Image (tube, rainbow, N blue to C red):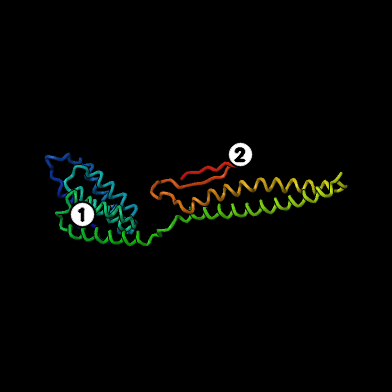
Amino acid sequence: MRRLLAAATLATLASSAAPQLALAQPSDAAMEEAQRVFQDAADRFGEENYALAMQGFQRSYDLLEGFERQHLVLFNIARCHEELGQLRQAIDTFRRYLDAGGSSGENADETRRRIHELEERLRMSQAREPSGPDSTWLAVAISLEIVGGLAGIASLATGLVAHDLYTGLDARCQPGCPPGSESDISTGESLAWASTILLPVSILSIGAGTPMLFLQPDQDAGESASVRIVPTLGGLQLSGRF
């Protein structure tokens, strides 16, 4: 079994149940349940099932409310956090253990050493984390720029083709349009409408994407940024949360 607090054995819990005048002691039933849950948690820890072990140790800790040596169980809870890779929680719980009475215990030096090592591991893991912009945010910004650029090119191209068609029709339709001109007129109208619609799409997409390339979301805000282009009766509406 990986290292648990040797002092926090069932024998210690059972033999140290002398009443304390300043504390409301747990009942005999609560003590028995705490010992049973503690032993089960220790077994789960030995099986490397650290999540269940932590739940058991936490339950045992709660049952020992008012017990003089309740803080001993905090060491085991911290060890579970450590094995689960929850470094910040492990550090905080080890410190709670020292503050609650573990600083004078036989393993106080070991606990301080563990805290130091965990702090080093935490700093190293944070240093390895990418410091650049959020990948999803950047991908959305680039996608908006690409869509805006393509829409702008398409708007220009369809507008030029429509202009050429209308110029040719003006020359051919004096004083009247010859038979077969209806197809060119319909095509010109469609291209003109497409150019008109694509232009604001281009402007909105580039207008939304450009600031996103320079403004990054607050990673500590708890809410992810989002941008939406919503079609409306009057055209397009840009909405978002930053």
Give the structural element (helix, strand or loop) at label 2.
Answer: strand
Up-down relation of residue 28 to residue 101 (above or below) = above
Quadrant position of residue 197: top right
Q: Residue at x 27, y 50 (%)?
A: 57
Q: Horizontal and vertical percent for residue 158?
A: 70, 52
Residue 1 in sight in this render: no
Q: Is residue 166 left or right of residue 240?
A: right
Residue situated in front as seen by the camera: 97 or 152 = 152
Residue carrying label 2: 232
Earlier sequence position, callout 1 versus callout 2: 1
Q: Residue at x 18, y 53 (%)?
A: 102
Q: Residue furthest top?
A: 233
Residue carrying label 1: 9
Q: Horizontal and vertical percent for residue 97?
A: 21, 51
How far apart are the two marked residues, 1 and 2, measured between alpha carbons? 69 Å
Q: Residue at x 24, y 60 (%)?
A: 116
How many numbered circles does the render carry? 2
Q: Quadrant of the N terminus?
A: bottom left
Q: Horizontal and vertical percent for residue 70?
A: 20, 47
Residue situated in front as seen by the camera: 123 or 60 = 123
Up-down relation of residue 227 to residue 50 (above or below) = above
Q: Amino acid at mark 2?
A: Thr
Q: Horizontal and vertical percent for residue 84?
A: 34, 57
